[in-house]
Amino acid sequence: MDNASAKKKFVIPALTFLCCVIMAIVETVIEPSYWIKSALKIVVFAGVPLAVLWAFKIKPPPDAFSLSKKSILAMLGLGAAVFGLIMGAYAITARIFDYTAMVESMTSDQQVDSRSFIFVAAYISLGNSFLEEFLFRLVSFMTLSEQSSKKGKTAAYIFSSVMFAVYHVAMIGASFPLPLLILSLAGLAAGGFIFDFIDSKSGKIYPSWVVHMFADIAIMTIWWLNM
C-alpha cells in the first residue's frame, strides 16, 4: 500500500471523530438555540466532510445516490416494520421506564415546546436523519470500505456503528437513566451495524436513511405521547 492510500484510509476515521467531537461540544457546552445548532450540524456533518474528501481526492461510491423505483416499496415496508418494532418495544417497556421524566428532560435540553415540536420532529425525522446517514454511512462506512481490504471493511462496519452510537451520548446521556442509556447505546450500535449492512447490499444510502427516518418518526411519536 502506498503512502497516499494509507493517508486516505486515515483521513476518514479522523474526519468522523473530529465531526462528532465538534457537535458534542456544540450539544453539551455551547448549547445554542435548536435551529442554530441544526445549521451548525449541516456544516459539520455535510459541509466539512465534502470539503475534506475533495481536498484529499477521495470519491464516495459513484452510485450511492441513484434510486430504483422497484426499491421504494421495499424500503417503505422495512421502514414501517421498524416503526412498528419500536412502538411495540415502547408499549412493553412503558410500565418499566419513566418515559415522561425522560421526555421532560429532552424537551428542556432541546428547547422545544408544543408549538415548535412539529417542526423539530419533521426536521429530526427528515433532515437530521439524512445528515447522520451521510456522515456515518456514506463517509464512515461506504467510502471507507472502498478504500479498504476485506479486513478493512469489517473494521469499517465496527467503526461506523460504534461512532454512530457514541455520538448520541451527547444528546441522550443526561436524559436517560443508566440502564436505559446502556440499552440505548447497545441498540444504537446494533442499529448502525444493520444500517451499514443494508446499504452494503444495495450500494445506496437510501435504504438506511428510510429506516432511520421511520425510527426517528417512532421516537418523535413517543416524545409527543409523553409531552
Image (tube, rainbow, N blue to C red):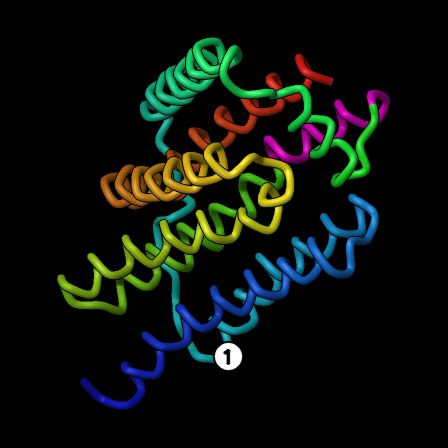
Predominant secondary structure, magenta span = helix
Please determine whether, in this image, residue 122 is positioned above or below residue 31: above
Whether residue 133 sits left or right of residue 5 in the image: it is right
Please determine whether, in this image, residue 95 is positioned above or below residue 143: above
- Please report the bounds of the magenta region as a residue range: 114-126
| Residue drawn 43% across the image and 40% down it | 182
Q: Nearer the viewer, residue 154 or 76?
A: 154
Q: Residue furthest toward the bottom?
A: 3
Residue 115 colored in magenta in the image: yes
Q: What residue type is labelled 1?
A: Ala
Name the quadrant containing residue 31: bottom right
Name the quadrant containing residue 189: top left
Mark 1: secondary structure? helix
- Locate residue 210, reporting x and y percent: 45, 30
- Locate residue 75, reporting x and y percent: 37, 24
Can the viewer see residue 61? no
| Residue drawn 39% across the image and 67% down it | 59
Please determine whether, in this image, residue 34 is positioned above or below residue 221: below
Residue matched to label 1: 55
Name the quadrant containing residue 109: top right
On-image quarter of the N terminus: bottom left
- Locate residue 16, reporting x and y percent: 47, 64
Specify few, some or many for label 1: CA neighbours under 10 Å numbering under 14, 14-19, or 20 or more.
few
